[in-house]
């Protein structure tokens, strides 16, 4: 069997149904083998779009997303998508063509050292020089991508290897002596954790993307409810715990809720599950949870004691460790936390997540998101771009289900949301998929409107158009004396752009039109691009200035 | 900054050295020396890495990050262990009147060996533990070292 066919057959063995791939000189044999395979090919209009689509496909389903590009520029265009997936621990296999083996290192046409380039932005990578190693490499790549702390794995495949012949044998099992991720938490550590919980008066759970990637939402709910511990979910953890639950504190950190940040600052026990104490969450480290004993449960040992010194480290899978905690906990010994809950209730009442409803005649972005939340009954998959749109979506859409919030948390990639939504809609055709975009970030992968039209992907694009790169503008307003350097945007007519691609475009300028417009957008089976002209200088509040303690928030404290 | 000796047993595969090196540069860790060679098992290479770590936390991170690399099989830190370490140096020294006496003295104290004598130079070798190498190098300074090459430290657990 030819190498190109071996690759496709291996992908089929891994259960791959869709590939987001862009052709080029070094992958023509692969595309030829794809032509009559059962795998569906989605052609993005830029390789970066393809990588984000594979990412959105993965985040919304938990399956490994697959993208494909040619050598050189094709592969370098994938890198932002690979780095995005890497920072957020998203399982992905990225396949890149390479010039033929005899030319590697010769500065051949469309040659780039893609294993070198992706070394620090992927979980692992391979250059396959021998067709006999191809099937095993694919098996290993999928195993690495989806196990332990998931992440993107890159396979660089020279064009001559695609044409070489070998026998096709696929392995059922895999064993890598140097890679054995932990699953269960150490029993001694579980006992130590429970002891701290029994004596805690003000405990808080902080949960992150690890809850989603390990599928631990039910175990988390059971544990939090049985121990009656309030839960704050980071951006990556949104949907891992129901936002509408009475124990939910909302998001912590820079644009988190006041009550989540107050609770962290005052708690005496902080239990982190699958969250990595990112600087956007912790703010000033010395003032972060200063009173608390800290427990850190994570599958990746490098995440533990990297940013925050912890008292009890547990290396293990979030789901397995939470199960252990639920099983081992003695309900008799769980403390009464009424006073703590009373205090949190007061904070919630005093500092609710809100926005000023002054009638300037302009649309408030938060209102648009609330309206989408209400009309989708919280069941839509929401993809965001990066910046203000992302934070408003995180704050005002209440996520009750895992894998319903797709956002570039770690890398903060503008241009992520729209293609990610396309990937998610292709994976979940019966679900409502909405992109919350900014006018800046939407233009970073706007060419994917062609993909939407080609495959009739019914995503709904909500542009919160403030004619600014809003988040940077907000910092310039607050910290740089309103010197709007490089942030005002002169935009194209998004309605006409959409129409040019054969997609319905709408423009909404008045608050009174929002409700009906959202209804119309959601009623459509086909894609819609809706250009909401919002209050241009609306800010995301509350806000913790970078490097400041998280209980010192601007806005929202009044 | 304290120097720590770490041993990583890695898959003897193409690209593994680059992975280790780029890990150190990407995360801003400072390598003082790095020695790589095959072990008794041809599928495994041993890397002895001497790192400068500001504090215990950085050292821990270095070890954990190394171990996280898929091709790294085991990581051992010699810091609190009973171990033996060696480094080999080769030095080219300008011939001077007094050189021979000093070389004889260093041969006695450190086991320095004269391996080659040319018209203008002596080439000497010394294999010893780090502390002795540093001492010997200090004494050799007066002899006008024209060239010095060192292998970096290797170590073995006792």
Image (tube, rainbow, N blue to C red):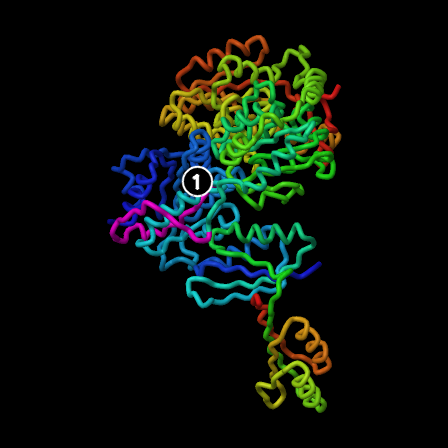
Q: Nearer the viewer, residue A127 or A99?
A: A127
Residue A296: where, in percent of width, then height? 60, 38
Residue A476 in sight: no
Q: Secondary structure at mark 1?
A: helix
Q: Quadrant of the C terminus of chain A?
A: top right
Q: In the rendered view, does B51 fall on the left or right side of A83?
A: right
Q: Is residue A338 above or below residue B147?
A: above
Residue A42 in sight: yes
Instruction: Count the labels in the image.
Output: 1
Question: Residue A477 occupies which quadrant of the picture?
Answer: top right
Q: Nearer the viewer, residue A511 or A177?
A: A177
Say if the magenta span includes residue A411: no
Say if the magenta span includes residue A161: yes
Furthest toward the front, the residue is: A332
Residue beneath disc 1:
A146
For label 1, the crowd category at 10 Å Cα-Cα, with few meaning under 14, some 14 to 19 and many 20 or more, is many
Q: Is residue A49 above or below residue A439?
A: below
Residue A386: where, in percent of width, then height? 57, 31
Give the magenta part as a residue range. Answer: A151-178
Residue A385: where, in percent of width, then height? 54, 29
Q: Nearer the viewer, residue B53 or A546?
A: B53
Q: Residue at x 68, y 18 (%)?
A: A345
| Parent chain of label 1 | A
Residue A513: where, in percent of width, then height? 55, 9
Question: Residue A69 occupies which quadrant of the picture?
Answer: top left
Q: In the rendered view, does A92 fall on the left or right side of B53?
A: left
Q: Is residue B150 above or below residue A177?
A: below
């Amino acid at each position: 069997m030819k190498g190109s066919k071996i690759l496709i057959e291996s992908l089929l063995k891994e259960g791959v149904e869709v590939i987001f791939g862009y052709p080029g000189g070094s992958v023509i044999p692969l595309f030829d083998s794809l032509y009559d395979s059962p795998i569906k090919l989605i052609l993005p209009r830029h390789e970066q779009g393809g990588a984000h689509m594979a990412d959105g496909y993965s985040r919304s389903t938990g399956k490994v997303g697959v993208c494909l590009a040619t050598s050189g520029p094709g592969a370098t265009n994938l890198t932002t998508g690979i780095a995005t997936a890497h920072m957020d621990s998203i399982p992905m296999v990225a396949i890149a063509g390479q010039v033929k083996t005899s030319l590697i290192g010769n500065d051949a046409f469309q040659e780039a050292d893609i294993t070198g380039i992706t070394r620090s932005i992927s979980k692992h990578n391979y250059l396959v020089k021998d067709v006999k190693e191809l099937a095993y490499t694919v098996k290993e790549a999928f195993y690495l991508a989806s196990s332990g702390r998931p992440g993107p794995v890159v396979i660089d495949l020279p064009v001559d290897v695609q044409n070489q012949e070998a026998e096709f044998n696929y392995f059922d099992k895999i064993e890598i002596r140097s890679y054995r991720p932990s699953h269960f938490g150490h029993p001694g550590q579980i006992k130590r954790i429970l002891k701290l919980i029994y004596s805690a008066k003000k405990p808080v759970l902080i949960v992150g993307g690890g809850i989603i990637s390990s599928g631990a939402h039910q175990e988390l709910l059971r544990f939090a409810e049985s121990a009656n511990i309030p839960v704050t979910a980071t951006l990556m953890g949104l949907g891992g715990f129901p936002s509408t639950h009475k124990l939910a504190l909302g998001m912590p950190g820079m644009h988190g809720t006041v009550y989540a940040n107050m609770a962290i600052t005052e708690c005496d026990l902080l239990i982190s599950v699958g969250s990595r104490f990112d600087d956007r969450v912790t703010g000033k480290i010395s003032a972060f949870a200063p009173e608390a004993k800290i427990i850190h449960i994570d599958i990746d040992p490098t995440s533990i004691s990297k940013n925050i010194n912890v008292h009890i480290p547990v290396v293990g899978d979030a789901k397995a460790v939470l199960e252990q905690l639920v099983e081992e906990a003695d309900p008799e010994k769980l403390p009464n936390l009424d006073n703590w809950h009373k205090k949190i209730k007061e904070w919630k009442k005093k500092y609710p997540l809100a926005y000023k409803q002054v009638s300037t005649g302009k649309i408030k972005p938060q209102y648009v998101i609330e309206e989408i939340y209400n009309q989708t009954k919280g069941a839509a998959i929401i993809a965001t771009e990066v910046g203000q749109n992302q934070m408003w979506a995180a704050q005002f859409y209440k996520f009750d289900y895992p894998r319903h919030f797709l956002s570039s948390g770690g890398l903060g990639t503008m241009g992520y949301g729209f293609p990610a939504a396309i990937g998610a809609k292709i994976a979940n055709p019966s679900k409502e998929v909405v992109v919350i975009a900014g006018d800046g970030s939407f233009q970073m992968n706007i060419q994917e409107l062609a993909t939407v039209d080609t495959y009739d992907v019914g995503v709904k694009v909500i542009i919160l158009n403030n004619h600014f790169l809003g988040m940077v503008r907000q910092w310039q307003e607050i910290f740089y004396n309103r010197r709007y350097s490089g942030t005002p945007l002169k935009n194209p007519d998004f309605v006409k752009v959409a129409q040019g691609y054969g997609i319905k475009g709408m423009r909404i300028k008045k608050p009174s039109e929002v409700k009906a417009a959202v209804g119309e957008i959601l009623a459509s089976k086909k894609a819609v691009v809706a250009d909401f002209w919002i209050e241009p200088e609306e800010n995301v509040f509350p806000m913790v200035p970078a490097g400041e303690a998280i209980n010192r928030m601007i806005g929202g404290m009044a | 900054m304290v120097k720590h000796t770490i041993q990583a047993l890695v898959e003897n595969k193409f690209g593994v050295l680059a992975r280790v090196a780029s890990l150190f540069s990407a995360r801003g860790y400072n390598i003082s020396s790095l020695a790589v060679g095959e072990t008794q098992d041809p599928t495994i290479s041993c890397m002895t890495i001497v790192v400068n770590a500001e504090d215990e936390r950085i050292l821990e991170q270095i070890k954990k990050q190394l171990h996280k690399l898929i091709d790294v099989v085991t990581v051992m830190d010699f810091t609190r262990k009973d171990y033996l370490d060696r480094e080999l140096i080769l030095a080219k020294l300008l011939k001077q009147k007094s050189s021979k006496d000093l070389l004889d003295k260093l041969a006695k104290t450190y086991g320095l060996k004269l391996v080659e004598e040319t018209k203008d130079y002596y080439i000497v070798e010394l294999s010893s533990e780090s502390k002795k190498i540093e001492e010997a190098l200090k004494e050799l300074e007066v002899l006008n070292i024209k060239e010095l090459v060192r292998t970096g430290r290797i170590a073995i657990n006792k």
